[in-house]
Amino acid sequence: MEKLMEGLNEAQQEAVVSTEGYIRVVAGAGSGKTRALTHRYAFIVNELGVDPAHVLSVTFTNKAAHEMRRRVKRLIGGEQDTGFITTYHGFCVRVLREDIHRLFYPKNFSILDVEDQKTLLREIFEDMELKMNEKTFKRLLDKIGILKGNTHYVQQMIMRGGMPAADEAGDLDGQIIQQYLKKQKRVYGLDFDDLLNFVFVLFEQYPDVLSKWQDRLYYIQVDEFQDSSLKQFELVRMLAQEHENLFVVGDPDQTIYEWRGADPKYMIEFEEFFPGAQTVFLKENYRSTPEILSLGNALIKNNYFRVDKDMLPVHPPGVKAVHYHGKNDREEAKWIVQQIQSLVEEKQARLSDVAVLYRAGYLSRNVEQELMAENLEYTIFGGFKFFDRMEIKDALAHLKMIAAGDDLSFSRIINVPKRQIGKKRMAFIRQKAEAEGLSYYETLKKYEDHEQLQRTGAKAFIAAMEELKERKKELNVSELLQEAMQKTGYEAYRREDGDQERLDNLAELLHSIVQYEQTLGEDIDLDEYLQMISLYTDHDREERMDTIKLMTIHTAKGLEFPYVFVIGMTEGVMPSVRTIRQRKERGLEEERRLAYVAVTRAEKALYMTESEGFQNGGQKKYPSRFIFEVEEDLYERVGGLDPALIEEAEDYIRASHHLKQEAPQQGFEKGTRVHHPVFGIGTIQSIDEKKNTYLVFFDNLKAPRPISRMFKKLEKVQ
């Protein structure tokens, strides 16, 4: 017990021992929330004697889950199963592997990523003889995403027998989407949306399955709870109903994913969803200097929809934050690079201590050009993700072929390296497979002597695969990958290709598997590894090189760096004019949270930069309102910012999409009778939290009106 509490502050200790009931931990940036989560998990296992099989710990990325498992194993001993430290999608996979047979799907269903989805669409476009392009794919994938916003389509997917035929008279997109669902079912593939939706349908149709999982999970803890969507919230609420032990950790001030479904209200209004819930505040910041924290605190205070808290610094004072104003883009980029050079030359920092953050990818171009001119090494994070690279997807497809022999992996690698199995021969394999209800690989085996497959590499491919399948049990994953790359000729093909970067990436993949096998100290089997890797969505590997890191603010969330440059802090860019137009006050609040996330990544020094000139649309550039919202004594200004330009900027902000950020004078509830100076008396029908408006049905009008919650003249009728 003493060892577990060692090094924890009072609030962290309170969080660790709060094990029963509904508990919300509001944990600001750099407040040691992961430490509190892992020690609480260890407390439940070591001090309460609860088996880890009864503890679900959910986080948002595989990288975070992997790190949490590593830390927990150090605290509770490596031999215990910590498989329920996972992501939402990872947990859904666990449920489905155990119970999906109830929905007439096999337990070894495959998990589809975006590239797999595009492969299915390509097949459909070929079958329907349509012209392919990436824009069409994106539009169709968006439509498929909208369809999967609810669970209705799942009924089609789980029907016994074939799927209903596509409506020939329907619109083309509808026909393609119907074909897509059909092909998805044929390969028993589930994408990320399906994983959650299938679990909801399973729980709804089989209450005994829900009851089994509720009964099994005595303790549930959720990290980054402010990023939960409605579905994710409903899932944990449902699972926690039996034992009523739900522990959530997060910071509403860091909700930056509303545009993809996250809703901070589950965190902010936690006590309304779970009456009697307890709240613990982790306010001590172990990351940044007092100067950086003061600036972050002052900025985020301008938001209304939040849980009020001030982060308290633990570190001694450092240097003031800097706001640099350049006369043009080039000057801004040159100044940034000069500052980095000074830090390195004066031995204050290595290149890898520096991060350059921006609101949108295009903003990095000028800085990249200057870094190249000065011969400074840099890495763009989240640009082209490691697991999205062609050679990595090829290597993993070889492993998937050994594990499941699925059609998507087969299509990907059958002709890489060239085996003379092009479009015509693939069409032959597809046609036979569909007619006979076989997989593509089974079809290839059955027809390897057919005249259509003469003079191809089919026999050699089958021989290699069969040998690898036989050796699957005796080899670990890293050895299996090496064997697969050699026996199928893929490694030789890449060597002949002469692209050293691709070979380096394959070596890095192998290294990451070996590292994974070593750190977890477990014999992970191939299926388990593939399941984990197919759920990776982030830059889930460590960059070991000494390079400056360039990334969007969204990518930087959860990371920290000694020296941070937040560049392009221009009105219309940050905050984004598009976000404000679309989501008004709520959009502006999310943009401010994004700026808060950016500045709180910095440990020792923070630089905010912007410059004059014109934006892409021809609009004159002004410094961001977020700079003006912070008291000037909290930062040092570098570069000549003309007072006339400040005045012009403030006028522009006021005249354009300026939104008052004061709290509403009243918080009326649904059903309240109110008086409006023009419309008269009416009743509040509903409240739109996202747009911060009341929908009021006035007695004298035929239709309701949206009235801002900021409108002071709306009064309650006594």
Image: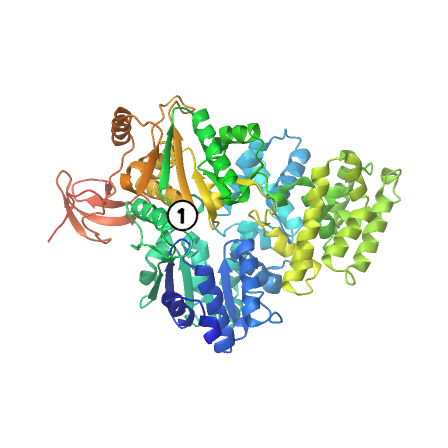
Which residue appears at 48% of the width and 73% of the height? 3
Amino acid under disc 1? Thr
Q: Position of residue 72 (x, y in %)?
A: 54, 66
Tell me if residue 239 can be seen: no
Q: Is residue 582 above or below residue 305?
A: above
Tell me if residue 113 can be seen: yes
Give the camera-side residue of 432 and 141. 141
Q: Residue furthest front?
A: 346
Residue 312 appears left or right of 53: left
Q: Position of residue 583 (x, y in %)?
A: 35, 39
**Residue with the mark numbered 1:** 600
Q: Residue furthest top?
A: 618
Q: Is residue 332 above or below residue 455?
A: above
Which residue appears at 49% of the width and 34% of the height? 361
Residue 128 appears left or right of 629: right
Q: Quadrant of residue 432?
A: top right
Q: Position of residue 76 (x, y in %)?
A: 55, 71
Which residue appears at 76% of the width and 56% of the height? 479
SS for dot 1: loop
Q: Position of residue 106 (x, y in %)?
A: 66, 59
Task: Count how many numbered circles sit on residues in the image.
Answer: 1
